[in-house]
Amino acid sequence: IDQVFSAVDITPNVIYATNMSVLTGTPTAQALPMEVYQPTGDTETSRPLIIHMHTGTFLPILYNGNPTGMRQDFATNAICEDYAKRGYVVANIEYRLGWNPTLPTQTERAASLMTAVYKAIQDCKSAVRYFRQDFEGGNTYGIDTSRIILSGQGSGGWVALGYATVDKLAEIQLPKFLDLSDPANPVPLIDTAVIGDWDGYGGLPALNTENNVGYSNDVHMVLSMGGGIGDLSWLEAGDVPMAAVHCPTDPTAIYSTGDVSVQQIGIVTTDISGAYDVLAQSNSLGNNASISAGTYNDPYTTAAQAASQGLVAGGFVDQNGTTISSTVDNVFPYMTGNPFESAPWDFWDSTTLVTAIAPAVGLTAQDAQGCHANGLATNPNMSIGKSLAYIDSTLGYFCPRIVNALLLPGNTVGLQETALNTSVSIFPNPANNNITISADNKAMSGIEIYSTTGRLVAKKEGLNTSLFQLNNLNLSSGMYIVNIHFNEGVITEKLIVK
């Protein structure tokens, strides 16, 4: 939860995959590198892994009209370093960029943008599989493959949310993802036969390369910093736990649900949902039950609750015209006082933009100065101090939720048994198909078993007994959370299934 290491070791330019980029217009093989951050002097060999994705609107820095947009961004590196000092292994990954916001029709712009998001999801899945492959080959980075978290800033948050929710062809063939110029012959904007499926398999070899084949894509939590989701219907019961920070004033990634527009061009795609609606849906589906099972007395949660209550009390209206009428757990709304704030954690150096980055990417000093001005339009009081303060608040808000959702050391899931004046035991544990739950001197009223992704897998209600047997559970191997209900409260225990 807190920083416990004073320094980190960084392994640079680790190539996790190679895939076909269309950024220059011609499909070209692109090596995909990452930096891996680890706590200096660490002897632990089973640490949770965070895969982090930078912002950038799926275009290279400056070409995107912004002063940020690469994995070398100040905030991206500061986030990765901070997580590593808190005891995580962190991968700061590059992913493929490339879409054309100047295409003449909204359908073409939507197809171009959604294809870019989709390819980035494929790349992130290659990164997850890379670490699982490495784990079997010796576990170079000392990770725990049962605790993998995706994290993303801005467009990286879009990738993380899409990764966790897109798993059906129908989800990428909703009407808004179809070319309906000929209503009798709708054409999918994303053609899996051409660019591969959402796992990065299949498609034409000229446009997709399969990477790290044969390993699981599973992740266990998603963290979004100002990201959005292509459609709220993608969220389903059983999706992984989620948490987010988001500026309700964001004009691009709408806090509730709205269209994505580019200034002077127009609508790119419609009905994209931000953290307010995403977390409300995720919470209501029960996907965040493992987060909600914990207790939170930290100042970041208190601040998030106060900010949410302030939006409701003030009748705040977001950039889509939606009035925020209720509070939502597991999202921290950042209200900075700037009317169009979207990424208060960002910092950039204008001199570096002009003298180093612009020449490196083939643009002029004037181009860089224009992007600097664009950045200041939404973040006028940008500074290192402000950036680090919001990064601290973000990780201070996220980390207790990671710890509880994944049952890491220091979790606050459930009540202390002594508070209920009883002792609970589950046996056998580890178990196969049957378990017995015993509570000394107190009658249980109900039992719930959740997977670590927050999915309810077994439930018994209306009990009035201190001893109960659950048979024929038919659970996959792994760790589960067992909530044992009493009239006075709930005790939470861990169950391992062999």
Image: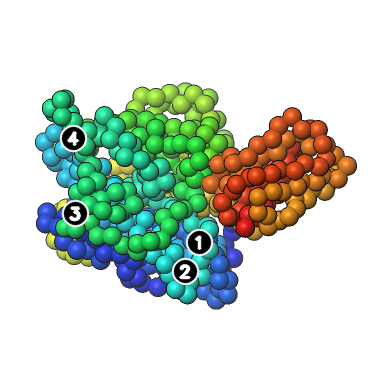
Quarter of the N terminus within the rendering: bottom right
Q: Which residue is mark 3?
A: 204
Determine the residue positioned at 59% across, 65% down.
4
The amino acid pointed to by label 4 is Val
Mark 2, residue position: 135
Element at label 4: strand
> Of callouts 3 and 4, which one flags the residue occurring earlier in the amino acid sequence?
4
For disc 1, the marked residue is: 145
The amino acid type, in three-letter code, at marker 2 is Phe
Label 2 environment density (alpha carbons within 10 Å; few <14, some 14–19, many ≥20): some
Q: Quadrant of residue 79?
A: bottom left
Can I make out residue 26 in this image? yes
Label 3 element class:
loop
Question: Which residue lies at the image location 40% right of the left edge and 42% below the top edge?
Answer: 165
Sort mark 1 into few (<14), some (14-19) or many (20+) by Cα contacts within 10 Å. Answer: many
Q: Quadrant of the C terminus?
A: bottom right
Extreme residue toward the right, this view: 441
Q: Is residue 287 above or below residue 48?
A: above
Amino acid on which disc 1 is placed: Thr
Q: Are marks 1 and 3 in contact (CB under 8 Å)?
A: no
Residue at coordinates 63% horizontally, 40% vertically from top-left? 458
| 287 or 11: nearer the viewer | 287
Vertical placement of residue 175 versus 412, above or below: above
Q: Which residue lies at the image location 82% right of the left edge and 48% below the top edge?
A: 423
State yes or no: discs 2 and 1 in contact (Cβ < 8 Å). yes
Mark 1 lies on a secondary structure that is: strand
Q: Which residue is mark 4?
A: 187
Q: Badge 4: how crowded within 10 Å, few (<14), some, or many (20+)?
A: some
Query: Could you tell whether 134 is left or right of 441 in the image?
Result: left
Instruction: Kindly identify the amino acid type of the residue bearing the numbered disc 3.
Output: Leu
